[in-house]
Amino acid sequence: MATVGFIGIGNMGANMARNLIKAGNRVIVCDRSAPAVAALKQAGAAAAESPAELASTPGLSAVITMLPSIAAVRETYLGADGILSVPAGTLRPWLLVDSSTIDPHTSAEVAAASREARLHPESAQEAGRERPAMLDAPVSGGVPGAAAGTLTFMVGGEEAALRAARPLFEAMGRAALHCGAAGAGQAAKLCNNLVLGISMAGVAEGLALGQRLGLDPARLTEIFNGSSARC
């Protein structure tokens, strides 16, 4: 099994990291929350103090990030103590996977920056390449899916990198679907969320109309769930 770094162990990330551990991987976590780190250490993980320290760990083949904002993604990858801040030729993980939900432009920008990094010679030999590969892989399924290991990953980046990452995705989810080049995974997530939002708005409008027409909202919800309104 692989040695994997995981940065961002909140409600989603902690469950994803636990499933990687259950699958037999060695997991090294990094997070600002000491209680979150302590909980994962009890589950069998090791810990690093910073993204840069994690990125310099011998034997590390991949880093997965699950972060709450664009700013957090930028800091984690591009910041002064970020993953890509390590000196040229010292980066250990050849595979970088960002499962945060951010905009496609930022995702493509970070992926482009990662292509300028140079791997440690040992990592380069293991991967058969001198520079890392980065995948944007936002998810659908929420905290229940993260806990159950049934997430769907929408993946942008090299298909070869996706093939290499598939055992990790399979430990955390039920599907990893290639969407195109860097940023395409985030674009797919935006489209998915748009459809979800429109559906939620439609349900709300339908219930409001039903109430105005004298219908019981509970019965109307039952009808929606058992008819073509359910999507």
Image (spheres, helix red, strand yellow):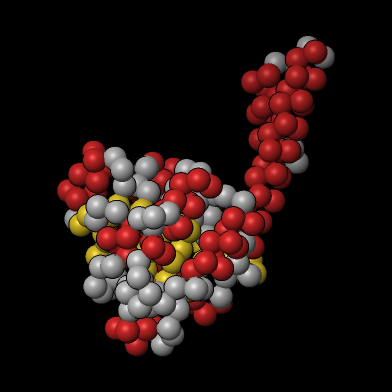
Q: Is residue 188 above or below residue 96?
A: above
**At 39% across and 63% down in the image, what residue appears?**
85
Counting from the top left corner in percent of width and height, residue 44 is at: 19, 55
Q: In percent of the image, x 24 and y 56: which residue is there?
A: 48
Is the C terminus in the top left, top right, bottom left or bottom right quadrant? top right
- Left/right of residue 5 with respect to residue 184 in the rendered view: left
Q: Is residue 75 above or below residue 175?
A: above
Image quarter hosting the N terminus: bottom left
Q: Is residue 131 left or right of residue 212?
A: left
Residue 196: x %, y % from top left: 67, 42
State the residue in front, 159 or 142.
159
* Quarter of the image where one finds residue 59: bottom left
Q: Nearer the viewer, residue 84 or 176?
A: 84
* Relative image position of residue 78 (x, y in whole percent): 46, 58
Residue 204 shows in this picture? yes
Q: Is residue 85 left or right of residue 115?
A: left
- Which residue is pictured at 46% across the width and 63% down the height? 97
Q: Residue at x 52, y 80 (%)?
A: 160
Q: Is 124 above or below relative to 151?
A: below
The image quarter in which residue 149 lies? bottom left
Quarter residue 215 falls in: top right
The number of numbered discs placed on residues in the rendered structure image is: 0
In front here: 184 or 54? Answer: 54
